[in-house]
Image: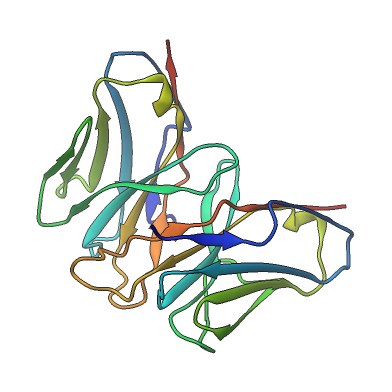
């Protein structure tokens, strides 16, 4: 079974703090993704990475950065947390596209971040 | 530009009846569509997919239909069970080699006993 683990289920931070969200996958997947989920807006892609040290902006990258130093680990960084970054953050991973994989993404349980 | 849309935020059905969740898309380059199911406090889990060259894919109680001319797909759950109560997301895949999916807003399904 694919396992995607997010380091925290709940986080409470103060405005202006630097926040690190960590994600680890154990299936040797090339692709990793960070999303945020907000009511009525679905899953919005923040950043993704298709290889170590590679990163691509998603649809809403402003206020975020990422780091992928090892294949299994993808970190999301909020440089200076703001209240509008209060959300559910979801990490996912997938195999490099192939016939069998059909681009199925496997998700972690999520981190609910509150910025006060 | 919202490439994948789920226009119904919520749906309520009686246990044993059919649930139909709808999804519309604008991008003709999608070559796969996927449905995910999400329970509260858990991450989404893959449910079923369909290739753009097919019009139907069935897996147990779950069937996905694709109408390419209308750019519309639907997920049918028959019979619906209370454990099916969750948020359902459809997603389009036209990513070539990036693995990127485009998700809809989600539909919350409630199945009443």
Left or right position of B66 against A14: left
- In the depicted structure, whether residue B35 falls above or below residue A83: above
B79 lies left or right of A42? left
The image position of residue B39, as x and y in percent, is 51, 37
Residue shown at 30% from the left, 51% from the top: B34
Residue B108 visible here: no
The spot of residue B51 in percent (x, y) is 17, 56
Nearer to the camera, A106 or B70: A106
**B50, B113: nearer the viewer:** B113
Corner quadrant of residue A29: bottom left
Residue farthest to the left? B54
**Within the image, what quadrant is residue B94 found in?**
bottom left
Q: Position of residue B57 (x, y in %)?
A: 15, 43
Q: The N terminus of chain A appears in which quarter of the rendering?
A: bottom left
Image location of residue B100, percent across then percent down: 39, 68
> Vertical placement of B39 versus A103: above or below?
above
Q: Is residue B63 left or right of residue B47?
A: left
Q: Nearer the viewer, residue A40 or A70?
A: A70
Asked whether residue A48 appears in the rendered view, the answer is yes
User: In the rendered view, would you say A92 is above or below B97?
Assistant: above
């Amino acid at each position: 079974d694919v396992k995607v683990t997010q380091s925290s289920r709940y986080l409470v931070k103060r405005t202006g703090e630097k926040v690190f969200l960590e994600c680890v996958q154990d299936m040797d997947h090339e692709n990793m993704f960070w999303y945020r989920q907000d009511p009525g807006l679905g899953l919005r892609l923040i950043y993704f990475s298709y290889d170590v040290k590679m990163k691509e902006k998603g649809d809403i990258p402003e206020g975020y950065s990422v780091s992928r130093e090892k294949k299994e680990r993808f970190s999301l960084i909020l440089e200076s947390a703001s209240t509008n970054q209060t959300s559910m953050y979801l990490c996912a991973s997938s195999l490099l596209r192939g016939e069998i994989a059909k681009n199925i993404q496997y998700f972690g349980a999520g981190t609910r971040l509150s910025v006060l | 530009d919202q490439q994948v849309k789920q226009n119904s935020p919520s749906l309520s059905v009686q246990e044993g009846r059919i649930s139909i969740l709808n999804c519309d898309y604008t991008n003709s380059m999608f070559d796969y569509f996927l449905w995910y199911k999400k329970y509260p406090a858990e991450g989404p889990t893959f449910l079923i997919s369909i290739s753009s060259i097919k019009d139907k894919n069935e897996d147990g109680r779950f069937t996905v239909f694709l109408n390419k001319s209308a750019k519309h797909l639907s997920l049918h759950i028959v019979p619906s069970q209370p454990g099916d109560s969750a948020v359902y997301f459809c997603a389009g895949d036209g990513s070539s080699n990036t693995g990127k999916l485009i998700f809809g807003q989600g539909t919350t399904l409630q199945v009443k006993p």
